[in-house]
Image (cartoon, rainbow, N blue to C red):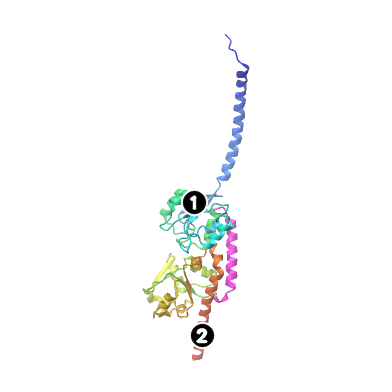
Amino acid sequence: MSTLISPKSGFRRVLRPLVLMIAAVLGLSLAACSSDESSDSGDTITIEHAFGTTEVSADPGRVATVNFENQEVPLALGVVPVGMAKANFGGSDILPWVQEKLDELGAGAGGDVEAPVLFDETDGIDYEAVSDTHPDVILAGYSGLDQEQYDRLSEIAPTVAFPKDQVAWGTPWRENIEIESKAIGKEEEGRALIADLEKKITEAADAHPAIKGKKTMFLTHVDPSDLSQVTFYTNHDTRPQFFNDLGMVTPDAIQKFGDANDEFSGTISAEQADTLSDVDIIVTYGDQAMIDTIRRDPVLGQIPAIRNDAVVLLGDDELGTAANPTPLGLPYILDQYVDVLDAAAQKASAQDASQDATEQNAA
């Protein structure tokens, strides 16, 4: 008995092998395209830092930052983070120069770019909030991360910590721009940003020649009820490092302490205050009442900067916050900061001239 084959079923028998062959050819073609795309999107950059190396996508789409200043590098380079730390100081959750840049990039109120999620770091890094932003990379080039914190962040996304040759909270502004611009695929733009900021600093310093060569120290918060110790930021901290950018000089005792200790702050007893006899200018957080208390102290009152009232007082305001130089904060307060440093330098110079005249008359 013969088997009858309908015209329709016969057509299907002929068509099916043809369809499979076409599909196979298309499949190979699509696979090749997919492979090429994967290769392009799979390019990575290796970043070395204090905790080893991190492989980062050459063009990460979602950038998150932790700790209080790291959002400024991507923002300065035109990248709005998906999440960043609240300021938690300075009077608002977002510092004015950061808000200004967010507005410029369309991420402010009414803008067409999604505003960053703000991480509350009052009690430390909010890992859950960071994870919820689904970042492709986490920037912490200026930070105090320890190994445990780094490991936890790395479970969320590739994390870039501070450079391996720096101490915690000691990354200079140039190096922070270098490591973070590289991590977001904007290394060339980062170099241009550094050059632009250096030009601004040079111009500001040249316009205030009185500050050049002045030995300047940065006192930390002073307790007027206990003047038995003097605590200061060392040359590992970015605040006094910025004095050097302006042509000012690190006092001998501060330099010696920093050379012997890998810490961003240091303490000496008041009995050693004579080692600060070359300090022309003091910058510190506090008020005039605190300085008056120090001036009345028979030992600390003999520090030249205290005796000559060559002191710059910083409050919990924009100037006090931006004394720690950052890519956006630095140009925002540069002229104001150099002005107050210049005023202190003028007092120091006037006292030096007066003392020289007195000594000449005595001779």
Q: Where is residue 209 drawn, in percent x and y?
A: 57, 75
Judging by the rendered image, the residue that carries numbered circle 2 is: 354
In the structure shown, which secondary structural element does the residue marked by tag 2 occupy?
Answer: helix
Kindly report the distance in space between the C-alpha atoms of the residues bearing marks 1 and 2.
57 Å
Q: Amino acid at mark 2?
A: Ser
Q: Where is residue 244 drawn, in percent x and y?
A: 52, 70
Q: Mark 2 Cα within 10 Å, few/some/many (few <14, many 20+)?
A: few
Q: Where is residue 32 drawn, in percent x and y?
A: 59, 37
In the current view of this chain or complex, which residue is farthest to the top? 1
**Residue 207 found in image quarter:** bottom right
N-terminal-most mark, 1 or 2: 1
Residue 132 is at least partly visible in this image: yes
What range is drawn magenta here?
184-210
Judging by the rendered image, the residue that carries numbered circle 1 is: 54
The quadrant of the picture occupied by the N terminus is: top right
In the structure shown, which secondary structural element does the residue marked by tag 1 occupy?
Answer: strand
Q: Main secondary structure of the magenta part?
A: helix
Lateral position of residue 265 relative to residue 108, left or right: left
